[in-house]
Image (tube, rainbow, N blue to C red):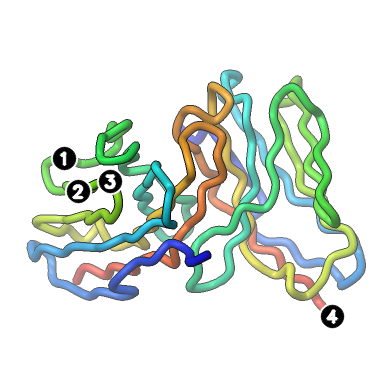
């Protein structure tokens, strides 16, 4: 049973436009959500997180939105740059992060110059 | 600050052989994690250490996988005997504490079992 779902395996976006990556979760006990970015042959790198007490968190070009009623979160990248091309993983945890992270399968973002 | 180090980066073995992976976390990080990432999937936690004690090993196949973190620093993950389905990237991560602290990942070890 997949508790964190990233239903789009891939996404292509023009440079300078907005990239929107989506993530759905099924476990209503999740209260802490993270996005990681992964380049080939490297480990995942933490990007941004959000607690369930918020509905938005912003860090530079990256914004994460959380819709608890829909059990949905999204990562917005504006403007998209070629260096953003990577696999993006959504992850979730319970008890403010005190339980193991559960990862989605990832979405491969390609930013076309 | 040096990142999480892992070795080897790549390993090819035949089924039923044994293999070991090594991880050196970021200095001062108390918590160490081992993840398994099968192709096309997200990372799955195998085991979590807090210093040299095991916090969570509920998803570790204990009949063939073992891990230790002696002295609360370096860690090794062993598979004995390996099966074809163990082919994956094994990622080590560390964090300053537990809970919501950011996890920093190493580059991983890509294991191929033939």
Please state if B83 lies on the left or on the right of A21 as rendered: left
Residue to which mark 3 is pinned: B72
Work out whether disc 4 and disc 1 sit on a shared chain.
no
How far apart are the two marked residues, 2 and 4, measured between alpha carbons?
A: 48 Å
Q: Position of residue A9 (x, y in %)?
A: 62, 57
Q: Are marks 2 and 4 in contact (CB under 8 Å)?
A: no
Residue under numbered circle 4: A113
Identified at 49% across, 28% down, the residue is: A98
Q: Is B8 located above or below residue B103 in the figure?
A: below
Q: Residues within 10 Å of mark 1 (few under 14, many from 20)?
A: few
Residue at mark 1: B62
Q: Secondary structure at mark 1?
A: loop
The mark tally for this picture is: 4
Quadrant hosting residue B92:
bottom left
Within 10 Å of the Cα at label 4, are there few (<14), some (14-19), or many (20+) other Cα atoms? Answer: few
Q: Are marks 2 and 1 in contact (CB under 8 Å)?
A: no
Say above or below: B101 vs B28: above
Between the residue at mark 4 and the residue at mark 3, the CA separation in whole angstroms equals 46 Å
Residue mark closest to the camera, 3 vs 1: 3
Residue at the image point whose x is 37% and y is 62% from the top? B89
User: Element at badge 4?
Assistant: loop
Eye-nearest disc, 2 or 4: 2
Whether labels 2 and 1 share one chain: yes
Q: CA distance from mark 4 to mark 1?
A: 48 Å
- Residue A36 image position (x, y, % from top left): 61, 53
Q: Secondary structure at mark 2?
A: helix
In the image, residue B8 above or below residue A104: below
């Amino acid at each position: 049973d997949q508790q964190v779902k990233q239903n789009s395996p891939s996404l292509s976006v023009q440079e300078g436009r907005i990239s929107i990556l989506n993530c759905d979760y099924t476990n209503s006990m999740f209260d802490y959500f993270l996005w990681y970015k992964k380049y080939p042959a490297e480990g995942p790198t933490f990007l941004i997180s959000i607690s369930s007490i918020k509905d938005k968190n912003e860090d530079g070009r990256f914004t994460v939105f959380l819709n608890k009623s829909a059990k949905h979160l999204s990562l917005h990248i504006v403007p998209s740059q070629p260096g953003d091309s990577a696999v993006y993983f959504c992850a979730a945890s319970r008890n403010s992060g005190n339980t193991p992270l559960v990862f989605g399968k990832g979405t491969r973002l390609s930013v076309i110059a | 600050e040096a990142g999480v180090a892992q070795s080897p980066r790549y390993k090819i073995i035949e089924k039923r052989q044994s293999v070991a992976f090594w991880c050196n976390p970021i200095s001062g990080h108390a918590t160490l994690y081992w993840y398994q990432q099968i192709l096309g999937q997200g990372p799955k936690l195998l085991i979590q250490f807090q210093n040299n004690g095991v916090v969570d090993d509920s998803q570790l196949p204990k009949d063939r996988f073992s891990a230790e973190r002696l002295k609360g620093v370096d860690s090794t993950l062993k598979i004995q005997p390996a099966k074809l389905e163990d082919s994956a990237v094994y990622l080590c991560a560390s964090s300053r504490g537990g809970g919501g602290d950011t996890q920093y990942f190493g580059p991983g070890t890509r294991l191929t079992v033939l």
